[in-house]
Image (cartoon, grey):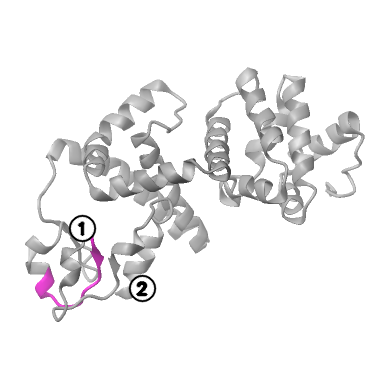
Amino acid sequence: VCKYVCSAVLMLSPPFFSLLDRVFPYAHLNNLDFLEVDGYIAGVTNPMFQHRSNWWDICCDLDTGEIKKSSPESEGQSQKHCQYDQEFINEIMDKIQNQDLDEHFIKSSFIEYTQNIIDMVFHEEIYLFEQAKEKQIDSFYMRLRSWKRTSHFEKYNRIRQLLKAQDNTADQYCIESNIKRLKTNSEIGGGETLQIFDDFNKYLSTKDQLLTLLTYLPRHEGGLHTIAMGLFSTDSKVVEATLLLLNKLESFKEGQECISRLNYFFLMTYNELCLKMLNINSSEKYPLL
C-alpha cells in the first residue's frame, strides 16, 4: 500500500508543490494524528477506515477498484469534469494495453493533464479554438472553484509567486508558455511565431537554459519536431531563427541526440538549409541513410 500511495502522489507532484508534506504512506489506528492534517493522503490496511466516512473525502479500495466519496458533488458538474477524466484514463489504459510504454511516459501524461487544469485556474492554458476553451472551462468550473477555496491552493499560489519572482524561474514560465503556443498553432508563420523564436534565441544562451527548453519537449510528444516545424515556415526570418536555435542545441551532446531523432524529412531539410543559409556542413553529423 505504501508504494501505491507514493506512486500516485508522484504522478501529480510536480506540477503540484508540497504534496509530500501531507502524505502518510502507512497509517494505523495507534496514531491518528494524520487526521489533523488538512488534505492528508494516507495508505491504510485496516478495513475500519473504510467505514469511517467522516475521516476522509475520498476512499480508494485497491482490492476492488471502488472509489467512494463521503459527500457527492453536484451530479451535473461532477459528470462534466469526470467525463474528461474518464476519457484521459481510457486513453492511457488503451496505450498501456496496446503499446510498450515506459513509466516515464505515463507519469508525463498525468503531469501534463494536471498542469492543464492548473493553467485554467491562472488563465494560462492555450487553446486552439475558442469553443474548446469555453467548453473545458465550463466542465472544470466546480473543480477549479473548489481547489481555489483550499489551504493547499493558497500555499501553492504563494510558492508560485515566489518562484516567478526569481529571474531564472520566470524564464522557465516563458519557455513553457511559448512551447504551448507553438504546439497549438495550426500554421507556422506570422509575427507571433517569429517573436517566440526570437525570444528563445535572445534569452536561451547557456547549456543549462537550453537543457531547460528540452525538458518541455519530451520524446514521447515528438521531441524537437515542435521547434523544427519552423524550418517549413513561409517567413524566411522564422526559418533563420529556427536554424539559429537548432544550431545552439547542436553545440552540446544532449542537443545533438535530440536533433538526430528528427525524422528523415526534417533532417534532410535541416541539412540543406544549414548548407544554404548558414554555410555549416551538418550533413556529416546527421546522415540521412
**Most common secondary structure along the magenta stretch:** loop
Q: Depth check: give the residue in front, 60 or 49.
A: 49
Q: Quadrant of the N terminus?
A: bottom left
The structure residue drawn at horizontal position 33% and vertical position 63%, both measured from the top left corner, is 21
Q: Amino acid at mark 2?
A: Lys
- Quick one: 183 or 40, which is closer to the camera? 40
Report the residue at 21% width, 42% height from top: 149
What is the magenta range? 38-49
Q: Is residue 128 visible?
A: yes
- Residue 181 in the image, given as x and y percentages of width and height: 54, 30
Residue under numbered circle 1: 38
Which image quarter: residue 78? top left
Mark 1: few, some, or many residues within 10 Å (few <14, many ≥20)? few
Image quarter for residue 70? bottom left
User: Does the magenta-highlighted stretch encompass residue 150?
Assistant: no
Image side of residue 5 versus residue 70, left or right: right
Residue placed most toward the observer, 228 or 195: 195
On screen, residue 43 versus residue 3, left or right, reads left
Q: Which residue is mark 2?
A: 3
